[in-house]
Amino acid sequence: MEETIQKIKPNLEKSVEKLKQELAGLRIGRATGALVENLIVDYYGTKSPLKQMAAINTPDSRTIIIEPWTQDHLVNIEKAINNSDLGLNPSNDGKVIRLIIPPLTEERRQELVKILHQKTEEARISIRNLREEVWEEIQNLEKDGKISEDDKFCGKDDLQKLINEYNEKVKEISEQKEKEIMTV
């Protein structure tokens, strides 16, 4: 039974990491490469993340410079940025693409907090679904006579402790990001 509970740890970690990656892409008023590095761009007919086809630099807190390894991809990168939900206007000078990050308005900050809460809830749902899968396995072990009813409830308590630990991690990440977004 302990094995059953422990085997979901990697999936729980993946849920937390996915949340971290998604939140890194939320624009918080200052330039960061994480904002654009995972944008999917058409690259020789295949969809690839921007970080695999260009150098991304942030010379100051308001500017991101994207320098593709081949100039042929400037148009595709520009198109991907325009199609994204970043709300940024790329400036293409034929060699690099510049993105100027405008300061956030209070309205936009509130929008970002809503998006943050949606992504946080998605992570919680993912964790909850994993808990349900393992709880079902524990119940099946009891039905098959492999564990006693007392063991089943001990397993449920252990499982809930683990789930609470990961929900707390998600909460901490979310609160930290909300603080970043709301800081003027």
Image (cartoon, rainbow, N blue to C red):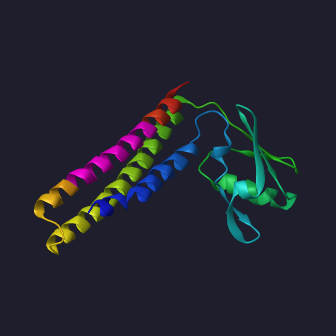
Residue 33 point in image, percent of width and height: 68, 43
In this view, the residue farthest toward the left is: 149
Q: Residue, x 20% and y 70% (percent of image)? A: 141
Q: Residue, x 76% and y 42% (percent of image)? A: 57
Residue 121 point in image, percent of width and height: 38, 49
Looking at the image, residue 130 sits to the left or right of residue 56; the answer is left
Q: How many marks?
A: 0
In this view, the residue farthest toward the top is: 184
- The answer to whether 56 is drawn above or below residue 129 in the figure is above
Q: Residue, x 37% and y 60% (percent of image)? A: 8
Q: Residue, x 51% and y 46% (percent of image)? A: 20
Secondary structure mostly seen in magenta is helix
Q: Is residue 40 magenta?
A: no
- The answer to whether 130 is drawn above or below residue 146 in the figure is above
- The answer to whether 159 is drawn above or below residue 45 in the figure is above
Q: Is residue 162 magenta?
A: yes
Looking at the image, residue 108 sits to the left or right of residue 65; the answer is left
Q: Which residues are magenta?
A: 156-174
Quarter residue 184 falls in: top right
Residue 58 point in image, percent of width and height: 74, 38
